[in-house]
């Protein structure tokens, strides 16, 4: 099936919407964010104020006693500074340096506080975001996982969310800090000298034009870079999982070539994105040098050409302006850098929210599964505790409730289905399985065998036809309750990180240790488990890599056994087990299937001989049905398969 149709937007669709949606995760921390903003404002104004005091400090020290110069434009500072000049310059120097140091200490304290708060806010926000994403992913239909690589999904949790974390932890505080710093700097500039401020504004307009140009060019390339990272991770994950197949078929050179192609694409889009981002810093830095020289020259010209004021007045003003150049160009450079981070975060955010916006499984069923007590007359009452018997609880529109015993009667009525539009897999399939029957499906790969079991589980819904379970249309049964009544053993066994006991108990979380051990014995897994280093407490990691494929399959069968369901689905359940192991578990499997409706998919025809009915599928159509003897007597397709005249492919 085609990949990447459902998630992973390649173009930014809603810049503002994505930002505001991400900011919505900060609502629980509104109080802390207010404190952070106040700290940022205090820090910005403290830095600006400390620089502003440089003008009266230098000018006051250079001026003669009782001089008539204006130091800052702030009369109360001018009066204090000049009174200090008139008395003791060293005392005045000490007071002013102490005042500047105090302001910087305040800035340091607020910076420490806001960083501590932002760490808590950002990590808590990312935890909530990952929780929401994972919870939503558990509700997505199987189709999403069938059409999206695992690497693509993993990228959402790692790279994309990490970028969103950077946006919250660094980008937002830096934007606020830079904004207030620029406001404070220009306010003080106008107070000190409006002429030099106008010169500075002209220079900054040029800087903003350059920032806008470079930012626009890098925006689309950062989005493409994120998409390329997801594709790269997906390919790495796929090749890592299939490394044995790659080596077995000497596919290394082809895999290297394909990886090089994908990696080259990432390199190209990443280079384009970062080329604009990386040149922005040097350009801004060099422009600040021009601003520095320009303000010094213009200030000197004004100082020596003025006739209205004492030229000495400009000593501190020019010095303050030169420092303010750094104070204003650095925030602008930081904003430019944060814009790049913003674009990357938005690209990652759109991919995360695209997954979160993927429609969940539709479950409009109302029929639920309950524990039941059934008397000799067949009357059913609901039980709060496990009784070993179940019933379907069916509420009706008139408020009444009826109960139907769960027996495992499954029927397909003219079911037509395809995973993709205009590609039909099953064609008007009709079949039935009476309670306790063993039904086997035989046919070539792609004939539709596994599709039938997918439909029984409602991994996919049937668009045409009906599937009835104990006479109830399965679309009316809640999916969770439907799946509680089923147990599956798949060809591709998956074990989870945890002990052997934990993996068996996965079939039924309230199962006792004794029940898990009994299930392992029924699957003939107990013997090999007891030879493991810690028996049932042996820790399994990385999908049970310390077990053989056959041992992993035995644990999967034990996991199905402990679930104790009325219906079993065995999809190539013994495909990875050797002939001797298959013989060992045959009796256990027979005991497990006793009294249960069982659907078996197998390429080994020896495993389906004792089935009550065998369905032979070809291109989504049942071409033969009957038990083993009947089908042999017919001398049709099954006969050809069984006698070796024709092989399954």
Image: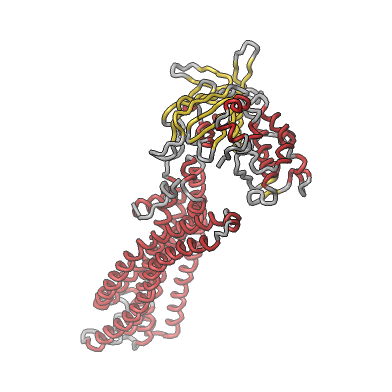
Q: Is residue 234 above or below residue 406?
A: below
Left or right of 551 in this view: 624: left
Left or right of 404 in this view: 25: left
Residue 101 horizontal/vertical position (percent)? 47, 75
Residue 201 horizontal/vertical position (percent)? 27, 73
* Towards the viewer: 628 or 514: 628
Left or right of 547 in this view: 228: left
Residue 324 horizontal/vertical position (percent)? 35, 76
Residue 182 horizontal/vertical position (percent)? 34, 68
Q: Residue at x 30, y 71 (%)?
A: 210
Q: Quadrant of the N terminus?
A: top left
Camera sees residue 45: no
The tally of labels here is: 0
Camera sees residue 468: yes
* Towards the viewer: 307 or 450: 450
Q: Is residue 481 above or below residue 556?
A: above
Q: Is residue 94 above or below residue 341?
A: below
Q: Quadrant of the C terminus?
A: top right
The quadrant in which residue 635 appears is top right
Left or right of 311 in this view: 233: right
Q: Residue at x 41, y 61 (%)?
A: 225
């Amino acid at each position: 099936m085609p990949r990447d149709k459902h998630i992973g937007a390649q173009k930014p669709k809603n810049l503002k919407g994505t930002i505001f949606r991400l900011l919505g995760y900060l609502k629980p921390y509104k109080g802390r964010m207010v404190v952070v903003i106040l700290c940022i404002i205090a820090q910005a104004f403290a830095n600006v104020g400390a620089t502003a005091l440089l003008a009266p400090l230098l000018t006051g020290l250079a001026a003669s006693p009782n001089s008539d110069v204006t130091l800052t434009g702030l009369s109360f500072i001018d009066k204090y500074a000049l009174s200090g000049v008139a008395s003791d310059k060293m005392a005045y120097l000490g007071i002013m340096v102490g005042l500047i140091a105090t302001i910087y200490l305040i800035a340091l304290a607020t910076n420490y506080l806001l960083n501590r708060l932002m760490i808590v806010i950002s990590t808590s926000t990312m935890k909530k975001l990952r929780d929401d994403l994972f919870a939503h992913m558990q509700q997505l239909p199987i189709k999403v996982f069938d059409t999206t690589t695992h690497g693509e999904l993993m990228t959402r949790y790692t790279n994309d969310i990490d970028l969103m974390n950077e946006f919250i932890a660094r980008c937002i505080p830096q934007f606020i800090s830079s904004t207030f710093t620029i406001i404070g700097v220009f306010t003080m500039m106008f107070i000190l000298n409006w002429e030099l401020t106008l010169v500075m504004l002209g220079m900054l307009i040029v800087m903003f034009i350059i920032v806008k140009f470079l930012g626009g060019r890098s925006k689309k390339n950062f989005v493409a870079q994120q998409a390329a990272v997801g594709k790269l991770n997906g390919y790495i994950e796929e090749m890592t999982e299939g490394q044995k197949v790659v080596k077995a078929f000497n596919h290394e050179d082809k895999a290297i070539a394909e990886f090089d192609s994908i990696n080259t694409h990432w390199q190209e889009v990443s280079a384009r994105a970062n080329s604009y981002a990386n040149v922005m810093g040097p350009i801004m830095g060099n422009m600040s040098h021009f601003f520095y020289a320009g303000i010094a020259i213009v200030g000197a010209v004004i100082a020596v050409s003025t006739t209205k004021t004492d030229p000495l007045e400009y000593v501190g003003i020019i010095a303050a302006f030169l420092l303010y150049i750094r104070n204003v160009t650095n925030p602008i450079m930081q904003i430019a850098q944060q814009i790049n981070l913003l674009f990357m975060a938005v690209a990652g955010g759109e991919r995360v929210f695209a997954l979160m916006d993927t429609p969940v499984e539709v479950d409009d069923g109302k029929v639920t599964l309950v524990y039941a007590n059934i008397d000799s007359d067949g009357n059913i009452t609901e039980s709060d505790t496990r009784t070993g018997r179940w019933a379907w609880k069916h509420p009706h529109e008139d408020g009444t409730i009826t109960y139907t015993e769960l027996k495992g009667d499954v029927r397909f009525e003219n079911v037509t289905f395809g995973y993709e539009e205009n590609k039909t897999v099953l064609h008007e399939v009709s079949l039935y399985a009476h309670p306790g029957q063993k039904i086997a499906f035989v046919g070539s790969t792609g004939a539709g065998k596994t599709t039938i079991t997918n439909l029984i589980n409602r991994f996919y819904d049937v668009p045409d036809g009906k599937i009835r379970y104990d006479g109830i249309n399965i679309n009316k049964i809640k999916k969770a309750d439907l799946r509680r009544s089923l147990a599956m053993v798949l060809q591709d066994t998956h074990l989870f990180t945890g002990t052997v006991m934990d993996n068996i108990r996965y079939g039924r979380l309230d199962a006792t240790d004794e029940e898990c051990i009994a299930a392992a014995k029924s699957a003939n897994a107990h013997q090999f488990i007891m030879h493991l280093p810690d028996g049932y407490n042996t820790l399994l990691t990385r999908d049970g890599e310390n077990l053989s494929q056959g041992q992993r399959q035995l644990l999967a069968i034990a996991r199905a056994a402990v679930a104790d369901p009325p219906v079993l689905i065995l999809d190539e359940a013994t495909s990875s087990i050797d002939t001797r192991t298959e013989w060992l578990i045959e009796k256990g499997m027979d005991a497990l299937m006793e009294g249960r409706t069982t659907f078996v998919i197998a390429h080994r025809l020896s495993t389906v001989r004792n089935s009550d009915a065998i369905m032979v599928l070809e291109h989504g159509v049942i071409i033969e049905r009957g038990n083993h003897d009947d089908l042999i007597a017919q001398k049709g397709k099954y006969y050809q398969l069984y006698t070796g005249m024709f092989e399954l492919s």
